[in-house]
Image (cartoon, helix red, strand yellow):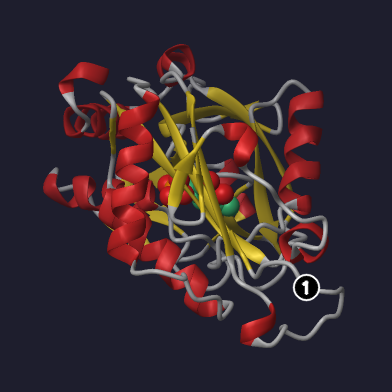
Amino acid sequence: MMLFGNQLVPDEEVRISPLDRGYYFGDGVYEVFRIYDGRLFEVQGHMERFSRSMAEIRISLPYPLEELENLLNRLTETAGIPDGLTYVQITRGAAPRSHPFPAAAAAEPVVTGWCSPFLRPLKDLENGISAIVREDIRWHRCDIKSLNLLPNVLLKQEALDGGAGEVIFSRGGVITEASASNVMIVKNGIVKTHPADHHILRGVTRSLVLRLAEGLGIAVREEAFRAEELASADEVFITSTGSEVMPVVLVDSRPVGDGKPGPVTRLLQQAFEASIPAGSR
Ligand code: PLP
């Protein structure tokens, strides 16, 4: 089943027009939720961010946000997937191709959503992954979870082609985030991550990890840091809905610290794991 508009329908009943503005302008926003133990995780954080992304690009959900939340819960229940992802997107709808917004009466926003199985990346969580650093060639509104992901796609592919797991973005020497995750470094026991401004996506996992760090008495600074600090960090990790708290043990082929996941990363991984439903641990 898929979400289409305000209904759950069989996949083959979803009909999208080739004139949908999401299709030719990327004119829409999306959200990705984690399913643990058959249920959506951190629902409120994701719903709030989706609502904000819609507001920032001036698309109105054609029904109340609470109704969308109910539909996504029903979609997830119906899917019956213990560990997975639930995706939802909204576009400005179908209209003859022209840059200005279509008149409200001429186009209805199109909502679609689906679930897919996704297992926790346990091996990588244990051993860590490698990353490359590349210039952040995205626009200056990375706080909006927009459908326009070509820079992320191209640079992530470059990372994978070179055998790395993620690409970390540097904007003029300042580390912002990664292609599909936020980046944190640890130096002398202090966690640093880019402030939640328009150069990064306000990760739901990032917020959770910052709360967990606070609870553990780990010092956190939401402040910009440069590529040199990344290179000389004791520990590096990324956070995202799919990657959770993922150690990065190699950056541009050079080991981070002693080349193994560090103690602060491990503490945060344990706290994260304790926060997810027992059925998915
Ligand atoms: N930054 C970018 C560019 C992302 O695409 C994502 C998630 O896909 C994140 C950060 C992490 O956000 P979240 O923790 O909400 O998944």
From the viewer's perspective, is residue 70 above or below residue 240?
below
Q: Position of residue 176 (x, y in %)?
A: 58, 58
Reading the image, the residue beneath label 1 is 95
Name which quarter of the figure residue 137 lies in. bottom right
Q: Nearer the viewer, residue 105 or 182?
A: 105
259 relative to 231, above or below: above
For the C terminus, the image quarter is top left
Task: Indicate the position of residue 164 as horizontal and vertical percent values.
Answer: 69, 26
Q: Indicate yes or no: mark 1 CB to ligand 1 under 8 Å.
A: no
Closer to us: 125 or 45: 45
Residue lying at the far top in this picture: please name it.
123
Q: Against 52, is 85 above or below?
A: above
Q: Is residue 187 left or right of residue 183?
A: left
Residue positioned most to the right: 97
- Mark 1, residues whose alpha carbon is within 10 Å: few (<14), some, or many (≥20)? some
Q: How many marks?
A: 1
Q: Is residue 79 visible?
A: yes
- Picture quadrant of residue 232: top right
> Closer to the camera, 253 or 129?
129
Residue 267: horizontal and vertical position, in percent?
24, 30
Residue at screen point 81% across, 43% down: 154
Compare residues 272 and 119 and report the one nearer the observer.
119
Q: Is residue 121 left or right of residue 169?
A: left
- The answer to whether residue 182 is visible is no
Q: Amino acid at mark 1?
A: Ala
Image spot of residue 273 (x, y percent): 24, 27
Q: Residue at x 56, y 81 (%)?
A: 58
* 96 up-or-down from 214: above or below: below
Q: Residue at x 17, y 52 (%)?
A: 214
